[in-house]
Amino acid sequence: MSVEPTTTTDTADTAAAVAGEAAADRATADGEDAAEAATATNTEAAEGTAERPSAAQLLQAMRAIDGGTGVIVTRRPPPPVAGQDDEPEGDPATGPSAGPSATANPDRNDDVSADGDDRAKEAPAATESAARPSTEQLADTIRAVGGSTGGLAEQTAAPAGGGDPSAPRMNHRAAAPHTSAAAPVPSTASASAQPPADVSRAEALRATAEVLAAGGAPAELVTATVAALGESAPALLRENPWAVLGVPGVRPEHADGFARGLLGDACGPDDPRRAQALAVWLLERAALRGHTAVELADVSTGLEKQGVADSSGALATMLGEGGDGSVMGFQEEIQEPGSHRSGSQEGEDAEPPVRVLLALDRLALAEDSLADGLVRLISTFEGDPLRSPAEAPEPAADNAGAAPAAPPALDWAAAADTAPSPSAAALIRAVAEAGLVLHTGGTAARAEPVALVRAARALGLRAWVAAATTDGRHRLDDEHAVTLTGLLSGAEGPGRAPDGTLDLDLLAVCDSPALDVDSAATLVESVADGARLVLSGDPAELWSAGPGRVFADLLAAKACPSVASRTPDFGPIGELASGVGVGELLPVEAPDKEVVIVTAKDGAEAVHRALQLVGDSIPRALGIPAEQVRVLTPGHGGPAGTRALNAALKQRFNPGPGAFGGFDAGDAVVHSPAPGVARPGTVRAGGPQGLLLDCEGEEVRVAREQVGTVRHGWALTAHQAVGRRWPAVVVLLAPDTANELTRQWVYTAFSRAERHLSVVHAVGPALAQAVAAVPARPRTTRLRGVLVEQTADLRD
């Protein structure tokens, strides 16, 4: 029985409608993609030599280091990891370097940024850029700052034992409140800009509207501005008009026009406030692509593209007294491939090559907090917790005067011997000896953390297992399975102990690759000293939608035991995905049509065939209802993106007028209340107050002003599908998506299917090439280096 689609008139017309109705959307997306590529690609440096910062600028930076208003932190490189490829070079501040990765990933950008930003276009810089300073010159600048103070500051590692257990635990949010990437922290906030406590939101909106009007900004920005900058927005914008860059969808050329409207002749391209806001904007854009830090040279280049003539001087000022602390600097030694330090005195005295990284304070603090918390779990683990005296056995009657006997040691060996699989047994043995353990494996390997939790509970420990999504929790099939969000909020699981930590002895977290630095830091802060934490996941899947690559960095750092599952994913889909995971796209035997590959000559035919599979072929041939089928595609824009596909699928499965803000009862949707969060659901009802959704069995009410966080959900991106599976999945790859494909993306998309996978593609050999040669989009992070340094100090 074949599920190869057959031609039908209605789907052919639908495919044509998709191409026609999406033309305007495609033009907008293409315009933004081209502009982003122009901004993201490293260009050749202009002729000439960049001037180094003045002595006054260096003195400012020196004082900042001494005073604590700016920090340059020296990091030593982690040792090379056998078998680990170096990340390709690129410009993380604005995107990877020229080539297939030069264009921003539409999956990532559309998932975590506002639609207003999708529609904005990059305008060429009005002022000719200065010559790009060399990496050596920028490093010299930082060395000069350090030399003025007797050397660069060394960041102190967490003390062995996790510090004073009686001291209150520091939450990284207390130091610098974290905001979403779509609403960056204003770079020039000051105490004087804060409004009185009794100023209402209505007053803030009114005052913000006045400021925006004075600068010539559209009134439509009022609500978004207050949402992004807070009720202090009017004072903040008057103090620094370029703070408007913190509003989603606002680009540098818009901010410059607004600043000219407010400042008049006093507005100039080298205004320090402008450089500060632009640097934060560049780092925020990099965070949308997953970077937690950016090389100083790349930020300098980004500033030059925006007309900042003395970019290195502006950065020195920013890191010194002239900055507000929203940007932090870190220095790492560079480990040259195959190089080694000489044992001679000359070699010891030679300064190693370094790179300087800049990071938003919120991301830097989160990454450091995460590293500190992980080291704390490693260093405070002392074995199994002793039972309280009330739980100790009573002394025998003939020995009533004797002290209670010590509780027996937990028999982990016996638990491992009765484990359901060798890999589960290996995981149990590793957890018996360590407070932090990593576990890797595919879909079938998810049973191993469940087996661990059941064994731990049988031994008397308070153990829980968490998944990233409600669907993932259901698939764990355990009464002590929770969602990570529910666990941390207290809605699910054991709740909190009096000290604020989770009231448990062991926590196993599945889907760990989905953890970004902020969520991972929150999780680790919630685990008590001496408790066990197991981070489990499939390292071949896409990294988090938010900044960081936490699970990959932990594996690379080798700071704790790691258990690799040997349990394979069975069936044709599992065999295909396993091959992709190691870089091979191989044909598989699928006697029951579990896997079907459909080639198309162009994008229109690919869309036509994908719609036909969903609406006719799969339900008819395999008996899988259309509502249990999802289409996965790399991006939101274009005729083969989620927007156009969802418009066509709605007409096919739930036509209607869009009575409730573009939605009708019965529409399949995805709710994204925060960047990187995607919850599939169905519209139940709607009205003037908003929408009522059923999200995986949970009733969710979306207020009218938040309806923009809901999109139709018959077609999704792979990032939106992470943590979930469906009975049937159709992966659609149009020709214009070829440069966006990576092994990670293909693996994640293919492994979302349970019973049937159809791959409809018109990318030719690009699919196999991506699987073989493009493992993942590079991300610049600091976690691995921080962990290697701290655990080395811990071992010493």
Image: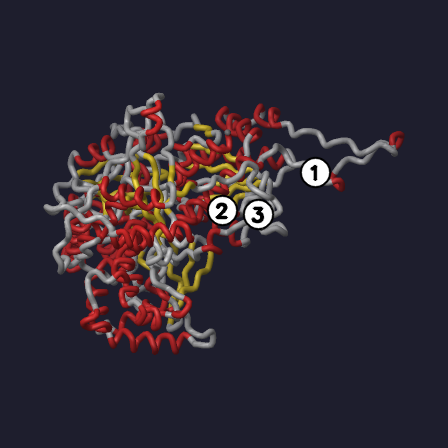
Q: Is residue 494 left or right of residue 706?
A: right
Circle 2 crowding by C-alpha within 10 Å: few under 14, some 14–19, many from 20: many
Q: For numbered disc 1, what is the local secondary structure? A: loop
Place residue 355 in its image quadrant. top left
As drawn, which residue projects farthest toward the left? 47
Give the answer, above or below, for where 181 lies relative to 388: below
Say if mark 1 contacts mark 3, CB within 8 Å: no
Q: The disc labelled 1 sits on which kind of residue?
A: Arg
As drawn, which residue projects farthest toward the top? 343
The residue at 46%/55% (across/down) is 175
The residue at 43%/76% (across/down) is 200
Image coordinates for residue 349, horizontal then vertical, percent: 34, 29
Question: Sequence order check: which comes first, mark 3 or mark 2?
Answer: 3
Residue denoted by label 2: 523
Label placed on residue 335: none
Q: For numbered disc 2, what is the local secondary structure? A: helix
Q: CA distance from mark 1 to mark 3?
A: 18 Å
Q: For numbered disc 3, what is the local secondary structure? A: loop
- For this rendering, which residue is in front, 245 or 513? 245
Q: CA distance from mark 3 to mark 2?
A: 9 Å
The residue at 60%/44% (across/down) is 165
Q: The disc labelled 2 sits on which kind of residue?
A: Leu
- For this rendering, which residue is in front, 554 or 462? 554
The residue at 54%/40% (across/down) is 507
Image coordinates for residue 687, horizontal then vertical, percent: 38, 71
Residue denoted by label 3: 502
Give the answer, above or below, for where 665 lies relative to 742: below
Circle 1 crowding by C-alpha within 10 Å: few under 14, some 14–19, many from 20: few
Image coordinates for residue 321, horizontal then vertical, percent: 35, 57
Give the answer, above or below, for where 604 lies relative to 226: above
Using the rendered image of the protein, determine whether residue 52 is visible from the camera's viewpoint.
yes
Residue denoted by label 1: 387
